[in-house]
Amino acid sequence: MDTKVYYLDRNNPDFDVLKYAGSVIRGGGTVVFPTETVYGLGANALDAKACKKIFEAKGRPQDNPLIVHVCSTSIDDFVEKIPDRAKKLMDRFWPGPLTIIFKKSKLIPDVITAGLDTVGIRMPSNNIARELVRQSGVPIAAPSANLSGRPSPTNVKHVIDDLYGKVDVILGGGNCDVGLESTVVDMTERPAILRPGGITYEQLKELIDDIYIDPAVMKKPDKNFRPKAPGMKYRHYAPKAKMVLIRGGLEDVVGKINELCRENMSKGLKVGILSTEQTYDKYPFGTVLSMGDRKRPETIAANIFDRLRQFDDLGVDLILSEAVEEKNIGLSIMNRMKKAAGYNIINI
Ligand code: AMP
Ligand code: MG
């Protein structure tokens, strides 16, 4: 497939390009676009045939539903009803990195929801994303624009590496601000966080005091696991190398990583270390990349997927990674890192 690539300025996007990309969506094609979370691979959410192309391009399992992106809070056509407390969340957090699960209306095709009677909807804050939805005149179904299983794309290079030749249009728009996917909240029953993301548990709790984090979010799913969010059961975000997370007091963690690094290098393995700004120069061996500043964990969120992909490009055999504290955005970072490591964790 011939893929057209356009680079847009997020603050001053070329409207001719957005109009054209909108017409591709309306015509049943696929368009990759930047959002504040990660890049999305979009198609017309009301066109089942167009949405099937998303699953094909990504190699995504059919039972993993897609999020529907909108450009306003007028979503009555797509849902059965908007519960009062869901309205509260929309008023406070839209546009932004929060996906809300509603009972779906008949307009939403089954292929999007993987046969569920619910639909996840979000209004992105990224200009290009919202304007693309507006220009296309339809809601846009879009999962992350990576090959299924790989780390999500947070810049246009990541997208081109995975999807060039498999989609009609790629819109580049710089690095994603948040760098992690949206938080998914189920508002059809007792409010539950099905996936932690750009909006934190602490922020949601301020508005919805009985909201809880689904227990499947932070631990390894067992064989009989039947998740509420189908995506929970798949291998995700995985770099090519084996990855191990080391968790504990920072000095002990640095000591353990250096020990494991030497041990594995002496076996002839190429070892990558995921450090933070605070520890970057404490690792004399291995290939060291910093994920960001521990005092500003949002920098770690913004960099994490890129660093995992850099280790792929560097061809390391093993990644030894520091852990971060599981609060605020740190909970979302650790959710992704645990999955990337296949729940391979050393506690010291
Ligand atoms: P992705 O866009 O690739 O990050 O994946 C979208 C995520 O949202 C997946 O983990 C889905 O399981 C979740 N999701 C989308 N729609 C629903 C829904 N109706 N019910 C539960 N989870 C959903
Ligand atoms: Mg994804």
Image: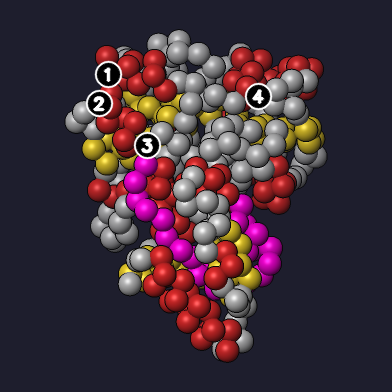
- Which amino acid, by three-letter code, is at mark 2? Ile
What number is the disc on residue 128?
4
**Secondary element at tag 2:** loop
**Secondary element at tag 1:** helix
Q: Which of the two discs, 4 and 3, sits closer to the camera?
A: 3
**Secondary element at tag 4:** helix
What number is the disc on residue 200?
3
| Stretch of the chain drawn in magenta | 306-328
Expressed as whole percent of the image width and height from the top left, the position of residue 108 reads 44, 22
Give neighbour class at mark 4: few <14, some 14-19, many 20+ (Cα, 10 Å).
many
- Which amino acid, by three-letter code, is at mark 1? Arg
**Secondary element at tag 3:** loop
What number is the disc on residue 208?
2
Above-or-below relation of 88 to 54: above
Mark 2 or 1, nearer chain start: 1
CA gap between label 3 and label 2 equals 12 Å
Give neighbour class at mark 2: few <14, some 14-19, many 20+ (Cα, 10 Å).
some
Left or right, 204 with reference to 60: left
Asked whether the beta carbons under mark 2 and mark 1 sit within 8 Å of each other, the answer is: yes
Label 3, ligand 1: CB separation under 8 Å: no
